[in-house]
Image (cartoon, rainbow, N blue to C red):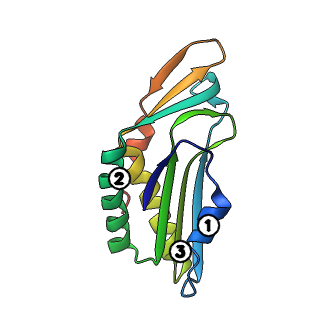
Amino acid sequence: MIEVADAPIDTAALQRSLENPAAGGYCAFEGWVRNENEGHAVERLEYEAYEPLVAVEGEKVIAEARERFPFLEARCVHRVGLLELGECAVWIGVASKHRDEAFKACRYIIDEIKVRLPIWKKEHYADGDSGWVNCERCAQHGNAK
């Protein structure tokens, strides 16, 4: 399940939502707003998303991950709107019978959503400037096998 949220992400509640008595492993990834990017002091981020396509393409990513790394449960939440330093911008959680599938599926999901989902990031810099960011490194990590 892929969601877009305009409120802070409750990571503990999301982890609980993945509980499954058959699960022996759980892996999560949290992407946080940091204070620097490529030599620029960052004060906050702003995210926008085209939610109908996020849902459709996101479900494809989850289905592909399940085919490659059989798991029991998976969820992904991405924030939109203004986010301050330290806030969670994206959360992915995977529960599986064994840890290896959870790790691999979690990595696959974050890598794929960064390159495939219509979610855009604008950085607001300490000097008052701002700019939409093209994550070139995201494409390098995408399509993990």
Mark 1 to mark 2 CA distance (whole Å): 20 Å
Which residue is drawn at the image coordinates 67% and 62% (left, top)? 12
* Quarter of the figure with residue 105: bottom left
The residue that label 3 is drawn on is: 95
Residue 15's disc number? 1
Question: Residue 57 appears at what percent x and percent y?
Answer: 30, 53
Q: Is residue 110 above or below residue 15?
A: above
Which residue is drawn at the image coordinates 30% and 60% (left, top)? 60
Tell me the element at label 1.
helix
Mark 1 to mark 3 CA distance (whole Å): 9 Å
Name the residue type under label 3: Ala
Q: Earlier in the sequence, mark 3 or mark 2?
A: 2
The residue that label 2 is drawn on is: 55
Label 1 crowd bin: few (<14), some (14–19), many (20+), radius 10 Å: some
Q: Is residue 78 above or below residue 59?
A: above
Question: Residue 120 appears at what percent x and percent y?
Answer: 42, 34
Left/right placement of residue 127 relative to residue 102 reads right
Which residue is drawn at the image coordinates 55% and 72% (left, top)? 18
Name the residue type under label 1: Gln
Tell me the element at label 2.
helix
Label 3 crowd bin: few (<14), some (14–19), many (20+), radius 10 Å: many
Q: Quadrant of the N terminus?
A: bottom left
The answer to whether marks 1 and 3 mark residues whose Cβ atoms lie closer than 8 Å is: no
